[in-house]
Amino acid sequence: MTDTATAGTDVDALRALADRVAAQAGPGEQVEAYVSQGTNTSVDAYEGEIESLTQAGSAGIGIRVIKDGRTGFAYAGSHDDDIVADALAEARDNLPFAEPDEWAGLAEPDGVAATALDVHREAVLATPVEDKVAMAIELERMVRAADPRVRGVRAATYTDAEGAFAVATSTGISVGGRSTIAYVSVSALADDGDASVIAGGMSVGRAIDEVSLAEAADDAVSRLLAKIGSVKPESAVVTLILEPRLTATVLGIVSGMLGGEAVAKGRSPFANRVGQQVGSPLLTIVDDPTNPDSLGAEPYDDEGLATRRVPLLDQGVLQGFLHNTHSARRAGTASTASAARGYSSRPGISARALTVLPGEGDLDSLLATVDDGVLASSLGGIHSGVNPISGDFSVSVEGLRVRGGERAEPIKEATLASTLQRLLLDVSHVGADVEWQPGGTGGVTLLIPGVSLSGR
């Protein structure tokens, strides 16, 4: 094992490469180069030893050429000059095969200044690999030693990554940036009669010193022990209590329905509802990649526009949608700098730092107000159990029954049914306990009465 500490990616070099490609635009052409480079380390520990250790790097370039309303695209997994030249030629060669698109065109500078964000930590790259291995092994030990009911650890993992990118266009954009993330995660096992239960925990930050092994271990063990003795509940109409982690998951589903492309294609229940009440007056939802608390914070989107705070719901009233350049032109509006991509794909649309603005109270204080409810610990099949067009919501749930403001028996093999629109409208309490998740979303505790629980 060797120490592979490095100073990280040279963003100026990535920008210089992107600039060289964009400068080759011919008459009537627009040319964009998206250049990326990244490194990551992942360590899995098992029974006090290294089960796997991976250190990998990636680099690539994606090139778009737009002419006469047609877009040619090509990419290459290399920054070698000859390979980049071939990719540019291939993008041009693909132009005749593309369908004409009246909204085709690259982003142009829009005058919004980028927010200065401190989202890169040299310590992620400078820390010796041996120290990262030690963290994974120690995390496994802590979970095994936490309680005699812990039968084993399925995975204890340390992961970190640095990502860097640059975008340059013949329309006058030339930007770049880099960021880091580090996290630990662990899955623990326990016996529950003839069956086994499993639960996970994690801790995440931008740097190693922002990661807590104790937090991840406590998270996994407390969730694990809470599952022992789970029963199939009786069917009822209950108040659903979403802890911050699950609120973030639901927000991720909602954000997909608030993308401009989904709306334009009729794949969103929120189409044609701007200015209408679509959520509880307690709900204000924003996507704010300029918020440094979010792990999704970035100064630029993946078309090179400065990110900005985008209000989506204000006291439950729909304010608008997330847009990249293409969807904004189609909708007759401006980009919200919500373009997202890798070097091998064209720009899509994604929220980076979605959150519900905090209200009052935390999980325990809000739970104490619930007479009959379910505190969900996991929602199974949520990505397939929510219809993105109708909003119909039917997912499996595990968690705890709540009676008289107290945690009661754990439950399993149950289903929650509603619609996403109804869930948003019926929110009765919003917590102040914002927790930022690895994907950048910030969740809070939500109480939602009137949800159907199907069991026995």
Image (cartoon, helix red, strand yellow):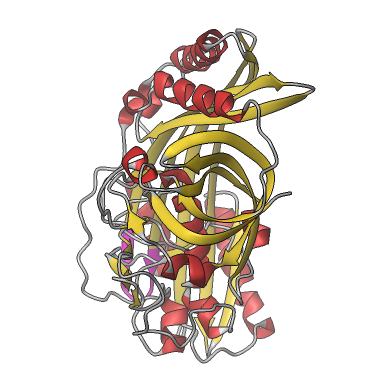
- At 41% across and 72% down in the image, what residue appears? 322
For the record, the magenta segment spans 168-175
Q: Quadrant of residue 229?
A: top right
Query: Going by the image, does 250 lie left or right of 445?
Result: right
Residue at the extreme right of the image, as rendered: 194
Query: Is residue 54 inside the magenta stretch?
Result: no
Quarter of the N terminus within the rendering: top right
Residue at horizontal 24%, vertical 48%? 117
Across and down, in percent, residue 269 comes to 54, 79
Query: Can the viewer see residue 435?
Result: yes
Q: Position of residue 249 (x, y in %)?
A: 50, 52
The relative height of residue 327 versus residue 140 in the rendered view (above or below) is below
Up-down: is 195 above or below 267? above
The residue shown at (57%, 79%) is 71
Question: Which of these two is toward me, 61 or 235?
Answer: 235
The image shows residue 172 at horizontal and vertical percentages of: 31, 73
Can you tell which quarter of the image residue 193 is in?
top right
* Residue 159 shows up from this direction: no
Instruction: Name the image quarter holding residue 98.
Output: bottom right
Q: Give the x, y percent position of residue 92.
A: 59, 75
Between 260 and 425, the residue placed more toward the observer is 425
Give the camera-side residue of 175 and 428. Answer: 428
Q: Residue at x 38, y 84 (%)?
A: 274
